[in-house]
Image (tube, rainbow, N blue to C red):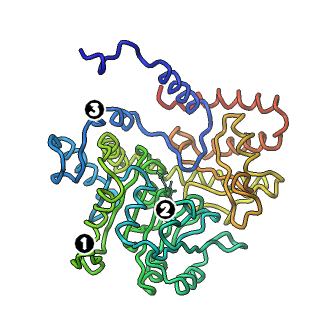
Amino acid sequence: MSTLVSPIIRDTQVFELIAQEQHRQESGIELIASENFVSKQVMEAAGTVLTNKYAEGLPGKRYYGGCEVVDQIEQLAIDRVKELFGASWANVQPHSGAQANTAVFLACLKPGDTILGFDLSHGGHLTHGSAVNISGKYFRPTFYGVEQETGVINYDTVEETAHRERPKLLICGASAYSRDWDYVRLRAIADSVGALLLADISHPAGLIAKGLLNDPMDHCHIVTTTTHKTLRGPRGGMIMLRNDFENPFGIKTPKGDLRMMSSLLDSGVFPGTQGGPLEHIIAAKAIAFGEALSDEFGDYANQIQRNAQAMAAAFVAKGYKIISGGTDNHLMLIDLRSKGLSGKLAENTLIKADITINKNMVPFDDKSPMVTSGMRVGTAAVTTRGMKESDMEQIVVYIDDVLMNHDNEAKIQVIKEEINSWMKAFPLYN
Ligand SMILES: *Cc1c(COP(=O)(O)O)cnc(C)c1O
């Protein structure tokens, strides 16, 4: 056998580190709202011979030979995700959520065009117009945000901003917004200024797929998402369409012919912004979409939402301030100023007890992005581990105990050991 495919020396250095990471994931409480734990079969598919295959193009239309099998795999992923979201078209090749959004910009905009997105410092995403991202460098970014008193988006203000800024693309969706979105109103606003409406459902995709939140598909021209957050698939992205673009919104190409949005989006992914698709990850996506189609996933998504509500209530009961007062989805943003703490201190202290959260800007934050006044927590990962509402109350007890004793290393160590043994009751991969 070739020494390349059957190496004489196994790379124990890397595998030892992977084992350490698995131990870290299994022994701690994972509350990062954008993370989740995939099934064993999703991981298995991601580590297969499919990584060897070049398949530039689309199923049945490839630039390489030998694609008969990967064509079937990618088609399966497309068919399943269309069923899952009721989409009429989907591209499952984007390597990440950022790639999916960039492909949409390339398909729909020209450099310098105006985009209107949700303010990053209020919970929006980098790819919706941040100055350090291509979306803010190549286009003219403008923003709407939440109201200071309520922490909720005021759609009248979105409308005023849209009328003032005249965007070509209106973007909704966020990374740290705990409330549902009014897609009907947003579409009316987009139509009133002749903008396209993009919903980036990266965070709540799993809840939307199971009908637990408003459905953007009927109202938004284009929908993008990651596949690895509440949807619980491998790390990746995708783009979907439902109703629009069978032609009225076709966009003129430089040659002057009217092309359908689906083909513009396909080209926006490849060759616009990517090369060969990751067929091993697409196989893992197909499996995750199959899992998400099951009734068990509906129960899972429901439990995520119930757990988030239980966790929010437990935080409020302990005197924590949640932006907007609560949550409709899987996450919440907590303003730590009333407790005299910064997001940085909370993140750095909680990790000592093996509780993983992330510091996060709160709307109208007076601290820098490296410090912040808030922390973001989500329930998708702990729900995958089998936790229920009462476990959320226990987690909040641990968090509060650690934060209220942030300078007591001995006490934090005791809590950490308690957490490590508690987590054994929620086995993950072993
Ligand atoms: C996570 C996220 C993304 C980016 O996903 P990556 O896979 O990290 O590129 C894009 N948009 C929103 C709203 C997100 O929350």
Residue denoted by label 2: 134
Residue 289's spot in the image, x, y percent? 34, 49
Under circle 1, the secondary element is loop
Residue mark closest to the camera, 2 vs 1: 2
Mark 1 is surrounded, within 10 Å at the Cα level, by few (under 14), some (14 to 19) or many (20 or more) other residues, namely some
Q: Nearer the viewer, residue 59 or 300?
A: 59
Comes first in the chain, label 2 or label 1: 2
Residue 114's spot in the image, x, y percent? 48, 76
Under circle 2, the secondary element is helix
Residue 113's spot in the image, x, y percent? 45, 76
Q: Please tell me whether residue 89 is drawn above or below residue 292 in the rendered image.
A: below
Q: Give how far apart the Cα atoms at labels 2 and 1 are.
A: 25 Å
Comes first in the chain, label 3 or label 1: 3
Q: Give how far apart the Cα atoms at labels 2 and 3 are.
A: 33 Å
The tag on residue 49 is 3
Residue at x 27%, y 74% (from the top left corner): 253
Q: Is residue 50 left or right of residue 14?
A: left
Residue denoted by label 1: 260
Q: Please tell me whether residue 23 is drawn above or below residue 304 in the rendered image.
A: above
Tag 2: amino acid: Ile
Residue at the top extreme? 8
Residue at x 27%, y 75% (from the top left corner): 254
Q: Are marks 2 and 3 in contact (CB under 8 Å)?
A: no
Comes first in the chain, label 2 or label 3: 3
The image quarter in which residue 107 lies: bottom left
The image quarter in which residue 325 lies: bottom right
Tag 3: amino acid: Val
Q: Give how far apart the Cα atoms at labels 3 and 1 are.
A: 34 Å
Q: Please tell me whether residue 80 is drawn above or below residue 116 in the rendered image.
A: above
Q: Quadrant of the N terminus?
A: top left
Tag 1: amino acid: Met
Q: Nearer the viewer, residue 407 or 98?
A: 98
